[in-house]
Image (cartoon, rainbow, N blue to C red):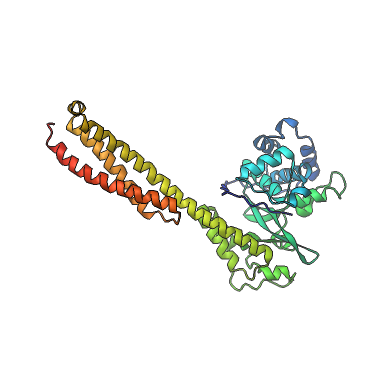
Amino acid sequence: MKTIHTAKLIFLLFIIFSFISIKSKAIDYLEIINHVNNTPISVKNSTLKLSVYLCEPYKTEKEKFASIFYWIAKNISYNDVQAKTTIYYESVDEIIEQVMKSKSGVCQHFSELFARLARHAGLEVYVVNGYTRTNGKVDNLSHAWNIIKTNDKYSFIDATWAGAALKTISKNKFPEMFFMMIPEENLKRRMPFDPIWQALPYPFKYQEFDKNSEKTATRKDRFNYADSINAYNNSELIDKQTGTMRRMKANGTFNPLVAKEYDLMEKNYEMLLFNREVVKYNQATALYNNGMKYFNQYVKIKNNKTDLKNYSRQQLEAIIDSASVNLQKAEKIFEVVSTNNAEMIGYIKKNMVNIEKANKILIKERKFILNLPK
């Protein structure tokens, strides 16, 4: 199964909802299968409408997850051709749009679509990237699946493998083996790149998984993954990335798949850092432009004696104040922009020089205005 890496940043929103506790009951899988099989054509091209249809009849989170899971396994086909190529997407929205249109894709399509449909229903779900093991040997492609939370417990979903299983099991059979797997069961075949998504108090090292170790994980200190996931949810994107990279480095020797993923994350981290500075630069530039607009407005008035007579001292002071405030704010932000981009550095230097000149002129003009009649 091939993981898709986006060329640009993907901003993902992880939303946690509170649910009324409902007494657990056995899932009627046959009823869910029948409900999914009767999905009207009118909702099949809209993730929101589809999610509403799939989840509306059900009260429990498990039933809603099961309905979404089965629809994807039943209706999305695995694209073997796409699995052999590297495709870059600009956003998760683009991934969702393609899979909804073509009804085919690779594991990233399956897992992102599952997450989108579940989040529409207010369910807590995450996309997990990692790699797999078959017959005791590590597979040569990365993989993606989902982790869900129900009743304060985490379990795993693999709609991609469920879709493949539907081709081999009898009709009207629900692929339970890939639905709500407990962490220990999931780890028999799937290893997350980020140990947080093992959902285990003692996570396994990469090499333990690679060697098909049946022993207990060697970590001595207990890992509170639930608190880590909560912290992850409350972090900025760049902090999420930092945390993931830190946990990966602490989780033992990298195999080629983990090393490749870490390298991609490093490059993405550099882009995140650059984009953060771009945001600062754009904020400062907007303030600078606004300040210069007021500055030029004042200069134009000052240079026209007729216009100058039409403005009171208070009005002129207000224009100068607006210019000064905006330029001072811009200056402070420009000072903390950290970048190696030559073009950006050049613009910052030029703007800082202009701000210095403008501020000197504004100081003189304040004195000039004081001598004007009120």
In front here: 185 or 250? 250
The x, y position of residue 137, in whole percent, is 77, 66
Q: Quadrant of the N terminus?
A: bottom right
The x, y position of residue 336, in whole percent, is 38, 55
Position of 206 relative to 360 (above/below) = below
In front here: 49 or 143? 143
In front here: 227 or 209? 209
The x, y position of residue 214, in whole percent, is 74, 71
Position of 297 relative to 325 (above/below) = above
The residue positioned 71% from the left and 37% from the top of the image is: 101
The x, y position of residue 3, in whole percent, is 68, 53
Instruction: Report the side of 198 relative to 232 (left or right).
Output: right
Query: Is residue 287 shown to the viewer in this render?
Result: yes
Instruction: Report the side of 349 relative to 102 (left or right).
Output: left
Which residue extends farthest right? 170
Position of 19 relative to 140 (above/below) = above
Residue 342, quarter of the rendered image: bottom left
Instruction: Report the side of 231 relative to 358 (left or right).
Output: right
